[in-house]
Image (cartoon, grey):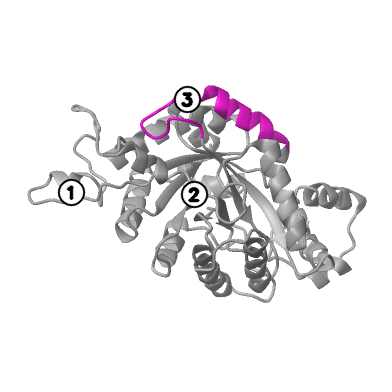
Amino acid sequence: MAADDPNEARDEIRGKAQGTAPVPLSVLDLVTVGAGRTATDALRTGVELSRLAETRGFHRYWVAEHHSMPGVASSSPAVILAHLAAHTDRIRLGSGGVMLPNHAPLVIAEQFGTLEAMAPGRIDLGLGRAPGTDGATAGALRRTDRPHEGADDFPQQLAELTRFLDDDFPDGHRYARIHAVPGPVQATSPGGVQSPHRPPIWLLGSSGFSARLAGVLGLPFAFAHHFSAQNTLPALDLYRESFQPSEVLDAPYALIGVSALATDDEKEARRQVLAAALNMVRLRTGRPGLVPTPEEAEAYAFSSLERDFVDSWNANVIHGTADQVRTGLDDLQKRTGADELMITANAHGGDVRVRSYELIADAYGMPRG
């Protein structure tokens, strides 16, 4: 979509670093549910955390679509974002991401058009092609025995969604008389006035497919470094090499998701990330559950294979004191050249997660209001 002012369009994507941070910092919230806690608790933490992020100068706050995971209460990003929009005023809110093959493009256009009407100029639409769950659940979501076919059609689905958002199907197209509302069609109706904004589209990925597609289309790109670190540099290189200037961006803009947890002492950080790693062990072995407590993780008898996985997983989690985390984030940004760091803090308790973002903001001297 061409914006009235190209600089305004870029401002909806590019952030501004705060304090001494090397690039803009943002938040990825998986709405994690710990053992002994409820989804209500996790969503309340989300409100508290989004307000903190807004006050401390984090650029955007995204939630990610997951399904059939007891410890992740973010199956409905649009619903959560509407809730967060009602409790914040300035911070950008978005999906990191909505899994496009799980949904009809028209439905996503309607949902995010509604969000844009609720919080004008603050909504991001991040899209992924993975199911955000296991194959059986993906089949239930997509009502098919061949869920992989949805991912194969991702470029076509993306093109359809974009046309619904822009209301610009050509004459003769089977959808030319169908309009996503709220949306641009309202401006063309008698007496109609429509917001000049529409949510910018981001492509998300953990491999090269979306990196190349985002580059070719001139879209911003978000890479899942937090669970696919070995592919980070190749994917970012591919995105930058493939990039073609567009009406959206005149140069590449890439953020990376980073798993980072800061605590008041180093030992507590190790305890918390061990619990999060145990949660991943169970998920990867078909036993998804609530995020265990640090005490449960310390008492757990890891097999040698599980211990190898934990060591490998936690090697990619930046954790420790605020100074240690700041150093780790700085080093990662220098190594990758990322234009933005989106931090996800995985821990059992919401209070630990909130405290982590406070400590990181303090370490960079970010604003307090």
Type of amino acid at the residue the image marks with label 2: Leu
**Residue picked out by circle 3:** 216
Marks 2 & 1, CB-CB < 8 Å contact? no
Mark 2 burial class by Cα count in 10 Å: few <14, some 14-19, many 20+ = some
Type of amino acid at the residue the image marks with label 1: Gln
Report x, y in % for residue 62. Answer: 51, 55
Front-lying residue, 58 or 137: 58
Q: Earlier in the sequence, mark 1 or mark 3?
A: 1
Q: Would you say residue 67 is visible in this rendering? A: no
Quadrant location of the N terminus in the rendered image = top left
Q: Is residue 129 above or below residue 91?
A: above
Residue occupying the far right of the picture: 304
**Residue picked out by circle 1:** 186
**Residue picked out by circle 2:** 141
CA gap, disc 2 to disc 3?
A: 29 Å
In the picture, residue 2 is in which quadrant? Answer: top left
